[in-house]
Each structure stands twice: as C-alpha cells, then as structure tokens.
Image (cartoon, grey):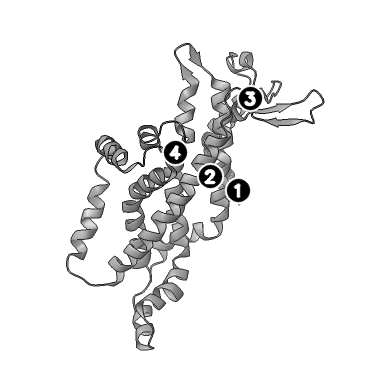
Amino acid sequence: MNGSFSTRMLRTIAAWVVVAVFFFPIYYWTSVAFKHGNDIFNRPPKLIAFTPTFDNFQKVFGISLGSGGITVTPGGGNFYMAPRVWDSIVIATLSTVLAVAVATLAAYALSRMNFRGRHSFVGWVLSTRMMPPVAVAVPMFFIYKNFGLIDTYTGMVLIHALMNLPLAVLLMKSFFDDIPSEIDESAIVDGASRFMIFRRIVLPMAKGGIAATAVLCFIFSWTEFLFALTLTTTSVKTVPVVSSTFVTSIGTAWGNMAALGAASIIPAFIFILLVQKHLVRGLTMGSLKQ
C-alpha cells in the first residue's frame, strides 16, 4: 500500500514538474507584458512581486484610458497593432478552411479509389514537404507580382493553404485509412453514391481527424514568417512580421513585444477550444484501428 502511494506521489510530482517546465516560459513572457521597463530587466527577475501595468498593451493596441479609467479611445497608442492581429486571424482561418477542404477531398480519393499512379502521387505529395520554403520564396514573389497578389488577403491565404496542403492530405489520408472500407462497400450495395458515402458516412466519422488537421494548419499559418514577410508590404501584415519591428538598431521593446505575443495567444487558444471536442478523438484514431 505504501509503495503504491509513493508511486502515485512520484508520478504526480513528475507530472507537475513537466507542466511547470512547459508553462513557465508562457507565464514569464506574459508577466513581461504587464511590467514596467525597470522590472523587465531586474536581476534576479521579479516573477510575482511587481506592480502590473497596462502601458505596453496601450502602446501596442492603441487603447488610451482616460484619467477616470472610463474613456477608451481606439488608436491612442504608439503602434496600434490591432489591425495586424485581425489580418492574422483572417489569413489563418481562411487558409485553414481552404487547406482542410481540399485535403479532405483529395485524401478520400487517395484512400478509397484505385486509379493509375495513386501511390506515386502520394510519394510526390510527401516529397514536396522536403523542399525548404526559402527555396520557393523568390519565385513566388515574382509570380505574385505578375498576378497582382502582393500584399493581399487572397495571396496570403493561397500561399498558406498551399504550404499546408501536403501535410493535410497525408494526415487526412491516414485518418480515412483507419475507417474500415467495408462501410463504403456496404453503402454501395445499398445504392448510395460515392459522394453520398463521403458526405453522410465517412466525413462524420473523420471529424476528429479533420479537427487535428485544422489545428496544425491554423498554427502553421498563425506562426508563419517567411512568406508573410516577402509577399506583403504595408496593407496586410501578420503578427510574426510586425513583432520583428520591435527590434531596432537602438534596442528591443521587450514589453511591447511581450504584450503583442501574449495577446496573439488568445485567438489560437480559442480556436483549439472550439475543436477540442473532436481533437482528442482525432489524435487517438490511429491507435483504435479496427
């Protein structure tokens, strides 16, 4: 009994240590967003005992509080990064929807339909992930320039969806492979069309896989830097790109950067919460293959 209790205690302590290791950087970075400049560079660092301030958020998101703390005036800060967060939300959401929609259709065809060159096509899709993004950044810039897609939502959504597509196809194909093909065959015998089987039978069973794939696509788009830097100028900017503007030749605005970083976690966290119901099932589908 004592041995079992000791084992549980050790496991609990080990679990809390792992949690602390993963969440401490997030806590520390968030605390920097609420610190004055002097507190940020304190040695040893002040983890709890500091006077919180919203000055960094006011400078970044342009929110000016009146003397009575009641009046709120948008655009009153030094940087006003709120539109940039909105740009990231729009690009990440639309590119995720586009990538997942196309990948789901392609993956179902690769998983269920027999056609010439199917296995070669899967290998080609996998090989596209081996090419570093920087190798296609310059060619994509000239292509976008000729088609007038520089600094547009359409251009950024397309490039993020294209970059996500190979991984999304491979993931969705693995999820469809885990669904017994006998289900499709039984439905065909009953007179169902291939599209009806996909829409009414297979697709609902693959909700977990779709959720897992969507989360990975969203996170990639939310954190992507290279194409967001090279294919935009002023009208469309994402959070990773504008974060780099806080690093200048005279120093780094750590408080402002931390405020933008802390706030940018919220949309991604909300997105994961929305698909959480199906996410766990999607991550465990491979271990439950029948």
The answer for how far apart the CA atoms under marks 2 and 3 are is: 24 Å
Quadrant housing residue 184: bottom left
Report the amino acid beneath label 2.
Ala
The answer for how far apart the CA atoms under marks 1 and 2 are is: 38 Å
Which residue corresponds to mark 2?
Answer: 268
Task: Note whether 211 is above or below 179 in the view shown.
Answer: above
Cβ atoms at labels 3 and 4 below 8 Å apart: no
Q: Position of residue 228 (x, y in %)?
A: 40, 36
Q: Residue at x 62, y 13 (%)?
A: 38
Element type at mark 3: loop
Which circle marks residue 5 in the picture?
Answer: 1
Q: Earlier in the sequence, mark 2 or mark 3?
A: 3
Cβ atoms at labels 2 and 3 below 8 Å apart: no
Element type at mark 1: helix
Task: Note whether 169 is above or below 35 in the view shown.
Answer: below
Label 3 crowd bin: few (<14), some (14–19), many (20+), radius 10 Å: some
Residue 172 visible in the current orientation = yes
Q: Earlier in the sequence, mark 3 or mark 4?
A: 3
The answer for how far apart the CA atoms under marks 3 and 4 are is: 24 Å
Q: Earlier in the sequence, mark 4 or mark 1?
A: 1
Which residue corresponds to mark 3?
Answer: 77
Q: Position of residue 18 (x, y in %)?
A: 52, 39
Q: Earlier in the sequence, mark 3 or mark 1?
A: 1
